[in-house]
Amino acid sequence: MEWSVGVVADFYGDEWFAKNARRRSLPVMSSLYDWPLSSPIALVRHIERAARIALLPEPVREGLTEGSNGIRRSTNRNDFDHLDVVLEVTGMALRDDWFVESEVATGDGRLPDLRLSKGTVSHVVEVTTQGMDRESRALDRQGEAVFADQSAVEHRYQVQCVTRETCLLTEEQLQQFMTAMEETARMVADHGGSRNADLGFASVVVYPDGERTENVVNEGPMIPRDLWPRFAQRLHEKARATSSAGSSWIRVDESGGLLMLTPAVHWSIEQQLSALQGNVVVELQPLAILLEVAPEHVRVRALGTALRRRALVGFR
């Protein structure tokens, strides 16, 4: 672990970490999933990140740090996530004996993330990440705010709560809900028994400590919607960006819940990949003349673990 900390620190540089600290941003440990002291998964990810950095040939290392698209030109969290995926692709390519280059311009002057070569075969690789949309991120922040206040109320009054929100709340509604939870908890602490408060857009049931009968602690709103158009738009953008680069691969790191609220969430990984491949072929058909895309050239593969399913979408 000491070795990995040194490798990562040297790669990003002291000034990069200092800039992030001044912005109150710590990309290496920005959440519970990234915090090595509380998550074995994060510990392994940190060591894995260092191992991939250690594999980098010096020209690639320099391009990824100091180049025109290098990490030290930005403290944006999205750029950090993007570079993590670039490191993953680079590591896989090097282990498979590909010659890896970065900062190699295409005929139209674009700078794809990587170029992989082996013998007479060469591929341009464009890496992109797509996380949750704005509404999903807002729901996540709302859930964290409610859970934090709920935990404080339970500790303060020695009670147990079950909270439910039916929609994305406004600031005023969220404050009303917090106030209702506080007042209901105070009544239970003073008079005993369970009590509830229902505001329509949110509700809370408060039990004396140790008497909560429900398995649910907090239940947020379910807002089903079609996330494919957003993914397809990103695919189109990257397809056009590599249209003059020859043989190209697009690596999409999709962590925005693309299949989460669909029947496909219950399918096997093979069925999911088959469905995704069919959708990708359909999306690329309008660009077929421009990109020389044929269905047999489209590949969709799963990467990573069940904790975070990833798709690699490639085409020529």
Image: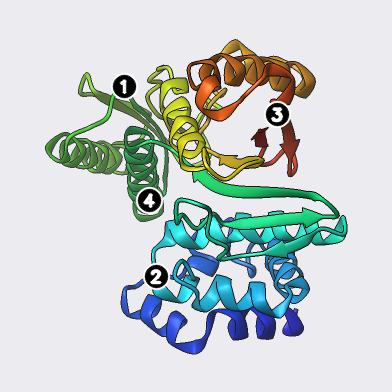
Q: Position of residue 56 (x, y in %)?
A: 73, 72
Looking at marks 1 and 2 on the same chain, the residue that comes earlier in the sequence is marked by: 2
- Secondary structure of residue under mark 2: loop
Looking at marks 3 and 2 on the same chain, the residue that comes earlier in the sequence is marked by: 2
Judge whether residue 178 can be spotted in this image: yes
Structural crowding at the residue carrying mark 4, measured as other residues with C-alpha within 10 Å and reported as few (<14), some (14–19) or many (≥20): few
Whether 105 is drawn above or below 281: the answer is below
Work out how far the residue at label 3 is from the one at label 2, CA to CA, in angstroms: 31 Å
Whether 225 is drawn above or below 246: the answer is above
Looking at marks 2 and 4 on the same chain, the residue that comes earlier in the sequence is marked by: 2
Residue holding disc 1: 166
Judge whether residue 40 can be spotted in this image: no
User: On the rendered image, what quadrant is the C terminus found in?
Assistant: top right
Work out how far the residue at label 4 is from the one at label 1, CA to CA, in angstroms: 18 Å
Amino acid type, residue under disc 3 in the picture = Val
Residue holding disc 3: 300
Amino acid type, residue under disc 4 in the picture = Ala
Residue holding disc 4: 148
Q: What residue is at 39 percent from the left and 75 percent from the top?
A: 20
Structural crowding at the residue carrying mark 3, measured as other residues with C-alpha within 10 Å and reported as few (<14), some (14–19) or many (≥20): many
Pointers 4 and 1 in contact (C-beta within 8 Å): no
